[in-house]
Image (cartoon, rainbow, N blue to C red):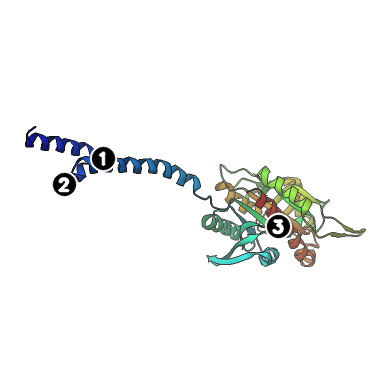
Amino acid sequence: MSDQTSVDRQRKDDDIVCPGCRSSAPGGFLTTLTRRGAWLAVFLLLIAVPLGCAEEPKPEPVTGILAAMPIELQMLEGQLQGKRTETFLDVAFHTGALNGRKVVLAASGVGKVNAAMTATLLLDHFQPSEVLFTGVAGGVNPELAPGDIVIGEKTAQHDYGEWTSAGFRPQPTGKMMPLFMTAPERLLAIAEAASKDAALDKVPTTQGERRPRVIRGVIVTGDVFIASPAKNAELRQVFKADAVEMEGAAVAQICWRQQVPCLIIRCLSDKADAAASADFEQFVKAAATNSAKLTLSMLSLLAKSK
Ligand code: ADE
């Protein structure tokens, strides 16, 4: 074989194996090593990439918890472990853990606009896997008393609609929007199970104390404090409401738009009647505490379910 023929064959081998190494690969033994190295690298990549993907840790789920007033958040905030605070648009969001569940807590302020803004900030900044709203409400169901709890199976805005000479007609807040937001069955079931474990404060009655009733029910929301037997009767008749408050349906709507499960939990502080303002002052703390206790008990169950 002439020298030229041997050089040509060497070039062909290099072309196939490693075009980029032509000048540095002297041939035979090293070329084989380079080829083995390349196959080994491909093999390792094929193993490592899927393994790496499988091991990527899922972010721990976080439960968003909102209330309107600081007094409704007080107990939860007091028990928060590893508390850190971040503020957006003047709303303080407290992160940490409660009963083994990662949470973020915020007091929205009273009314639908404050509640909707805070819910939007919560979803945008913290991506909670579910949102719970805890706090107090006026009773509309005549069988309930201050201290009893309504778990919001359905929520609606009672002050959104059309006033005509025939009276007020409630309407959904958008073409695609239902009049009533329905809470997810999973959260309703967890709340009911939690109510059996929660050490709820007793309800005072004329015949002594009794354990609070916890019912699934209809919660209606509007930008007014109801202290009128006539309006109360209307809310019962038109919406079959069990409780009335000022934030829940707004938060449920924001969550519904973003497909985040949401549950409104309310403990009655008054009966939305002529005595509502006085009853509210008397019972707000005890009612806020009962709602927070049920929420805490739900967090234990959510922590076990992750
Ligand atoms: N929150 C507590 N009591 C209420 C009432 N009577 N009306 C509206 N919101 C309330």
Q: CA distance from mark 2 to mark 1?
A: 16 Å
Question: In this rendering, is residue 89 above or below 214?
Answer: below
Residue under label 2, please give it. Answer: 23
Residue under label 3, please give it. Answer: 296
**What residue sits 21% from the left and 40% below the top?**
28
| Of labels 3 and 1, the one closer to you | 1
> Which amino acid type is shown beneath numbered disc 1?
Thr
Kindly give the residue lying farthest to the top in the view shown: 1
Q: Give SS at disc 1.
A: helix
User: Which sits earlier in the primary sequence, circle 2 or circle 3?
Assistant: 2
Displayed quadrant of residue 198: bottom right
Can I make out residue 285 in this image? Answer: yes
Which labelled disc corresponds to residue 54?
A: none
How packed mark 2 is, by other alpha carbons closer than 10 Å (few <14, some 14-19, many 20 or more), is: few
Direction from residue 47 to residue 195 in the image, left or right: right
User: Who is closer to the viewer here, 145 or 42?
Assistant: 42
Residue under label 1, please give it. Answer: 32
> Which amino acid type is shown beneath numbered disc 2?
Ser
Q: CA distance from mark 2 to mark 3?
A: 71 Å
| Of labels 2 and 1, the one closer to you | 1
| Of labels 2 and 3, the one closer to you | 2
Direction from residue 106 to residue 71 in the image, left or right: right
